[in-house]
Amino acid sequence: MGGEGWFVMKLLVTGGAGFIGCNFIRYWLKNYPKDKIVNLDKLTYAGHLSSTLDFKDNKNYRFIKASITNTRLVDRIMRDVDIVIHFAAESHVDRSIIGPTLFIKTNILGTQVLLDAALKNKIKRFHYIGTDEVFGSLQLGSDKKFDEETNYDPRSPYSASKAAADHLVRAYFHTYGLPITITNCSNNYGPFQDPEKFIPRMITNLIDGMDLPIYGDGLSVRDWLYVEDHVRAIESVIMGGRLGETYLIGGMTRDISNLDVARKLASIFGKKNSVIKFVKDRAGHDRRYAVDWSKIKNELGFRPRYDFDVWLEKTVDWYRENEWWWRSLKSRAENLYRKTNQY
Ligand code: NAD
Ligand code: TDX
């Protein structure tokens, strides 16, 4: 595939008003200025038109507010599309613990609606954005990593719904020959991430002079990746990935715990570690994620570019400079945690 030069692509991006989706569209419009993008987003609590302000008037961009579960509309939109990049999902593990139903509807049934429409309209590529959480939890202290051969072992309603969608996408390849690719990525951070999620919650709490609520003992490990690296990895799979294949994407940190991240953030703000407060643990909390990304590196030459310490600071700067974006979202986020007693 390729949108640069002679071949102009029409992309359907789902969930483009969310964190990763808006960063993807921003990147794509800049790097492939001739391509056309339709952003299909229901604007749930996690979708914000304020995340699309800088490109909403681009002549090659169009926004449609609707659900991916709307079969007729999805079919109509796909008549004029070359490639689908499917980000839209209910994405927050804590919300999936409170109420799994919407996760099943959006993440599984919504994906199936898109797959059916893609098949019917002979889409050239269906790229699915998966998560490393489908592989379950690694032991603390082990040097094991997830790779493309790792067995699925999802442990939250969120990751179970994402695992089901991965399987459906691959089933459409094997059964019907739909040209698909899948990426399973580790935890992202960067601009436009909702203050419900860990890093933006910690940063905005620090800006507001609040404590940092850490679940359990804080020793759980995530494999952090700057969002633009995720976007670049998706780009490399769209451009060069083999059909039917799955590629894992991970970061450059080496077993950094939530506590380590909170300490780094406190120190960026010149605060003592005493701002860290241990709160009730997440039910079924996955202990450790780590991703072996050698397949995408060896096959497609992709490697992450953005160093965690440097880009964590830049992310802090972004939240300091863009309070207009997150301020109105903050009280809703903290209300959620009052409900779960994690504040
Ligand atoms: P997000 O929650 O910030 O955004 C999700 C977007 O999807 C929102 O704009 C929301 O309005 C939209 N949406 C939800 N339900 C919809 C529906 N029924 N129809 C249309 N739009 C709908 O999520 P994110 O962090 O940007 O994640 C995007 C994708 O990447 C998800 O599939 C997620 O599972 C996956 N992923 C995320 C991470 C991460 O660290 N954030 C890591 C790996 C994979
Ligand atoms: O206040 C908090 N305190 C805390 O200790 C929050 C919000 C989280 N945590 C912990 C839980 C996790 O160990 O921080 C870690 C990261 O939490 P989240 O930001 O909720 O991310 P996670 O559950 O790891 O899932 C994320 O990465 C994979 C995304 O939300 C998923 O969409 C993606 O698939």
Image (tube, grey):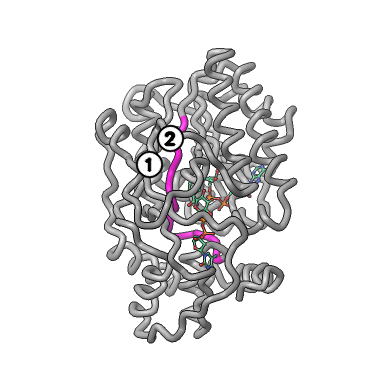
Give yes or no for residue 206 being in the magenta stretch: no
Q: Which residue is mark 2?
A: 150
- In the image, residue 71 lies at what x, y percent? 73, 29
Magenta span of residues = 182-195
- Across and down, in percent, residue 63 comes to 60, 43
Q: Quadrant of residue 320?
A: bottom left
Q: Would you name the residue on which mark 1 appears? A: 249
Q: Position of residue 166 (x, y in %)?
A: 55, 32
Which residue shows up at 34% across the image and 34% down it? 236
Relative depth, front residue between 50 and 117: 117
Q: Residues within 10 Å of mark 2 (few under 14, many from 20)?
A: few
Which of marks 1 and 2 precedes in the sequence? 2
Instruction: Tell me the quarter of the picture where residue 89 sits.
Output: top right
Task: Specify the quadrant that holds the N terminus.
Answer: top left
Relative side of 257 to 164, left or right = left
Residue 196 picture quarter: bottom right
Q: Are marks 2 and 1 in contact (CB under 8 Å)?
A: no
Q: Residue at x 37, y 75 (%)?
A: 263
